């Protein structure tokens, strides 16, 4: 066994300290940078097609047009939902401060709900009548706790900016895709030894694209379409319900269950039964949309266990905020694919010496 000299030991300590220093410098940007890589991998086929249409001479023009279109399709809907959620929280907080908090009372239609109608009506009506009194009596407590929640949700604006910065990083990577791929290939080859880097990169690339298209993209589409329906129908807190729809879609829970309360609210608060019926048909169709889109967008070769998707979404949100929902889901899916490939491989992967 080879022994370390004092000089080699000092070199190792200094190198470790430099790497650790670099890690802490980059730590605040790890989530943004990772999401930028995921977006670059997922969107590159579309980026490449647009560049082929414009040709090599108009590469910069194609990049600019792609950026504008993608921002309009990704950032604008995100901003609309975040702005709506922020406004709802702000209005509630202001109402508590001004002793004006009031919950809309139920209509007589609630009593017609099967089985639970009478009970829901009584509890809802009681809550509505006592909400203002309760808010006044517990004003300090609500302002203290509500203020903490409000501060947390102000980070949603930062989330939109994080999405935008991640997309800029993605555009930079896509513009220099060849160099980025070659650099990644060299790194993975050094890591695992031999020339297995390309296979691992392609496996990671395919997994990212399948998860983004078949899970995240579908969830965002469902959430945004639900948000539009909630907004037009006048459902209170439309962004909150839309956010819950997105989380349910990502962790593979039936979206239909999530939208049932909004259907009940629509029939209870709307003066038009026709409008409530149209809303119900629309929202049920949207909630079932994943059954059509997933078979089209999701590769049959992707078999990530549901528990990993749930843990990835929840763990990612705890670690990186809202943007972590997407990062965690993709990262654990990629790790699961690499793990599956490793345990089923006949060849041993040895770390490079």
Image: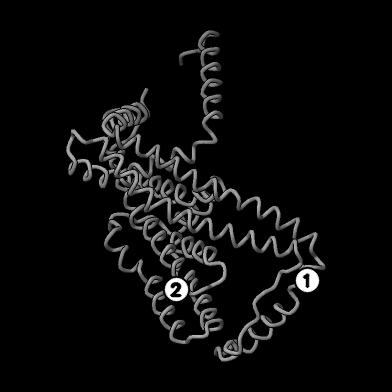
Front-lying residue, 81 or 245: 81
The furthest residue to the right? 137
All told, the count of numbered labels is 2
**Residue at 67% of width from left, 74% of height from top?**
103
Give the structural element (helix, strand or loop) at label 2.
Answer: helix
Q: Which mark is residue 30?
A: none
Q: Nearer the viewer, mark 1 or mark 2?
A: 1
Tell me the residue that label 1 is attached to: 134
Answer with left or right where residue 136 lies relative to residue 345.
Answer: right
> Which of the 4 quarters of the picture holds residue 346?
top left
**Residue at 69% of width from left, 52% of height from top?**
148
Tag 1 and tag 2, C-beta contact below 8 Å: no
**Residue at 79% of width from left, 63% of height from top?**
139
Give the crowd class for mark 1: few <14, some 14-19, many >=20 residues within 10 Å: some
Label 1 to label 2: alpha-carbon separation: 33 Å
Answer with left or right where residue 8 lies relative to residue 198.
Answer: right
Location of residue 276 in the rendering, given as x and y in whole percent from the top left corner: 46, 82
Measured along the vertical axis of the image, is residue 309 above or below residue 98? above
Location of residue 56 in the rendering, given as x and y in whole percent from the top left corner: 18, 34
Measured along the vertical axis of the image, is residue 91 above or below residue 260? above
Give the structural element (helix, strand or loop) at label 1.
Answer: helix
Q: Which mark is residue 256?
A: 2
Location of residue 263 in the rendering, given as x and y in whole percent from the top left corner: 49, 78
């Amino acid at each position: 066994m080879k022994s370390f000299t004092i000089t080699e030991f000092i070199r190792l300590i200094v190198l470790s300290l430099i790497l650790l220093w670099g890690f802490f410098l980059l730590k605040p940007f790890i989530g943004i940078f990772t999401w930028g890589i995921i977006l670059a991998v997922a969107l590159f086929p579309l980026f490449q097609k647009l560049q082929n249409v414009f040709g090599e001479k108009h590469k910069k023009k194609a990049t600019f047009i792609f950026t504008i279109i993608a921002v309009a399709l990704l950032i604008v809907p995100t901003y609309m939902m975040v702005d709506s959620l922020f406004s709802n929280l702000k209005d509630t907080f202001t109402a508590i401060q001004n002793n004006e908090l009031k919950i809309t009372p139920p209509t007589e239609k609630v009593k017609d709900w099967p089985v639970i109608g009478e009970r829901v009506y009584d509890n809802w009506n009681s809550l509505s009548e006592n909400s203002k009194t309760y808010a006044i009596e517990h004003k300090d407590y609500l302002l203290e706790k509500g203020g903490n929640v409000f501060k947390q949700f102000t980070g949603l604006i930062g989330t939109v900016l994080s999405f935008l910065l991640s997309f800029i990083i993605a555009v930079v990577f896509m513009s220099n895709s060849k160099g980025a791929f070659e650099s990644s290939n060299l790194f993975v080859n050094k890591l695992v030894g031999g020339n297995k880097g390309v296979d691992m990169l392609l496996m990671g690339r395919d997994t990212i694209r399948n998860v983004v298209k078949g899970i995240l993209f579908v969830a965002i589409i469902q959430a945004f379409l639900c948000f539009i329906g909630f907004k037009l129908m006048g459902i209170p807190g439309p962004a909150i319900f839309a956010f819950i729809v997105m989380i349910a879609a990502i962790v593979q829970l039936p979206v239909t269950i999530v939208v049932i309360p909004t259907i009940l609210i629509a029939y209870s608060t709307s003066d038009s039964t026709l409008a409530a019926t149209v809303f119900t048909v629309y929202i049920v169709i949207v909630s079932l949309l994943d059954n059509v889109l997933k078979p089209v967008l999701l590769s049959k070769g992707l078999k990530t266990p549901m528990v990993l998707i749930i843990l990835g979404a929840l763990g990612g949100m705890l670690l990186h905020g809202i943007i972590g929902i997407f990062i965690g889901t993709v990262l654990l899916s990629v790790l699961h694919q690499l793990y599956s490939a490793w345990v089923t491989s006949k060849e041993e992967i040895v770390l490079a010496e």
